[in-house]
Amino acid sequence: MCGIVGVVSHSPVNQLIYDSLLLLQHRGQDAAGIATANGSNFHMHKANGMVRDVFRTRNMRSLPGTTGIGQVRYPTAGSASSEEEAQPFYVNAPFGIILAHNGNLTNWQQLKDEMFRIDRRHINTNSDTEVMLNVLAHELQLSSSGLQLDPAALFNAVSGVHRRVRGSYAIVSLIAGYGLLGFRDPFGIRPLCIGKQETPEGVEWILASESVAIEGIGFEFVRDVAPGEAIFIDIEGNLHSQQCASTPSLNPCIFELVYLARPDSVLDGVPVYNVRLRMGDYLAEKIRRELPDVAIDVVMPIPDSSRPAAMQVAKKLGVEYREGFFKNRYVGRTFIMPGQAVRKKSVRQKLNAMGIEFKGKNVLIVDDSIVRGTTSHEIVQMARDAGANKVIFASAAPPVKFPNVYGIDMPTRGELVAHGRTDDEVARMIGADHLVYQDVDALKQAVRDINPALKEFEASCFDGNYVTGDITTEYLDRIETARLAPSSQSDRDAASEAIDGGAPARSQLHLQLSVG
């Protein structure tokens, strides 16, 4: 999960991209980067850290140009703390290309090998984004014969990418002297949408992961990019589009709606806030069925993403809704922090339980999901320490039982508290008196209630169905082995130490690349 944005404007884009990345900060807190095009020159600055920390005034001044892309990174492949793998990535041939990526390529290792053996391209990092960049570059070379580019050649190249690449991907890419290219994987797993703004000089365009990054900077939301579709906006502001996949189908990641996306976004025709309310309706029905004799005095959310569901649960059950947990907004999202010890420590820094709301009460706590169980255990213990009589825990999402390989960092079965365990066993592990999970079918129906046109979803972490068709038990075994390898562990330990010790050290990476 990362956040990406691309802008074609008639005025400098550095501030527009910066503002959009702030609106997408929830999608990645590990690193941030912006690249702009000014004539035949690319300018890029990227580093580890939050957007506000990576970019200073001097950095923004060094990013001239009316076309640009940006990314906030949440690592799912490669080293969790490697600044070399911050995005965007650059390659100088053909034409000069800069690219940012949201998703995860499931065959990136195979492609990396092909790049070296067949395409004669060198991949210098363990980032699947660098692999994607070089696949695109190779396909552009073939489509254009290294000569002039036109939209037909660009779209033919994207078709080649779709044929070779597996997994999830939403892409924004600058091509020197030509414009902005964006495309989405044929299954539509990761989101990408289009916005525009009318100006006296002409139309300005934006591509972004979520609609909030479009509307939040004053642009008008136009539509979602279709699965397999490519969008090309030339430097004059003309938009070209074409379906580049042979058999596209829309299977959006349902975990985006549960947790990842901002509630004020609209993804594939689904207002995120509305579907989270609907999730609360179905969750309340299940609580009523499974715990008919359990007295509940108060319903409390874990801020912020579970709040809409919790409000609906309280309303449907006829129980008082209260805010008992208060959030320190200066601590990052615990779900995307490396290392169990770091997550456990950060929960107490992030949340505080107010005793007056818990003392002597049977409290129903509603969270958006339970992944590793570390956070849930700490929250239940906080409620007990604050004086709760009983703690009932409800998850607005179904049990996370399977690894996600499409861009969410939950790749090993052993890390998932619900994998191979019953609900009662999970309840004991997190210390709750009772535990209620949302049903998978109810979650999918909650989305369909809002947008009936959506038929299928990427919900592999809940139902074990990997829509790309290339994920086997052997594949999952390989990625788990790689994740638990000593080098990977040392990377995670180093990342944990950096967070425990404060802000990680970072070097300033500013590149000015002249492209012929």
Image (tube, rainbow, N blue to C red):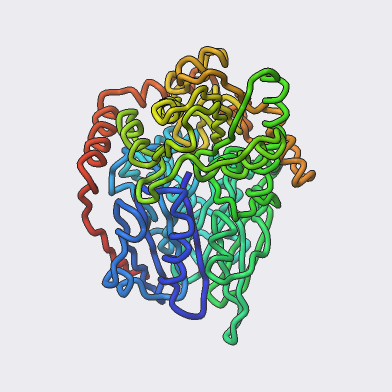
Q: Residue at x 33, y 71 (%)?
A: 60
Q: Is residue 407 above or below residue 182?
A: above
Q: Is residue 453 left or right of residue 207?
A: right
479 displayed left or right of 313 = left
- Up the image or down, 515 lies above or below 319; here it is below
Q: Position of residue 469 (x, y in %)?
A: 62, 28
User: Residue 387, can we see it?
Assistant: yes
What residue appears at the point 46 percent right and 63 percent down from the top-left corner? 174
Q: Position of residue 32 (x, y in %)?
A: 36, 55
Say whether residue 445 is left or right of residue 2: right
Residue 470 visible, this angle? no
- In what quadrant of the picture does the C terminus appear? bottom left
Rendered position, 390 above or below 300: above
Q: In the image shown, does 236 or 354 lie closer to the viewer?
A: 354
- Report the residue at 39% width, 27% height from top: 385
Q: Position of residue 491 (x, y in %)?
A: 26, 34
Up-down: is 169 above or below 155?
above
User: In the image, what residue occupies the spot 59% across and 55% down?
Assistant: 264
Across and down, in percent, residue 430 comes to 46, 21
Is 468 situated left or right of 377 in this image?
Answer: right
Query: In the current view of this chain or complex, which residue is farthest to the bottom?
Result: 200
Taking depth in this image into account, of 427 and 7 the one nearest to the observer is 427
Query: Number of numbered discs present?
Result: 0
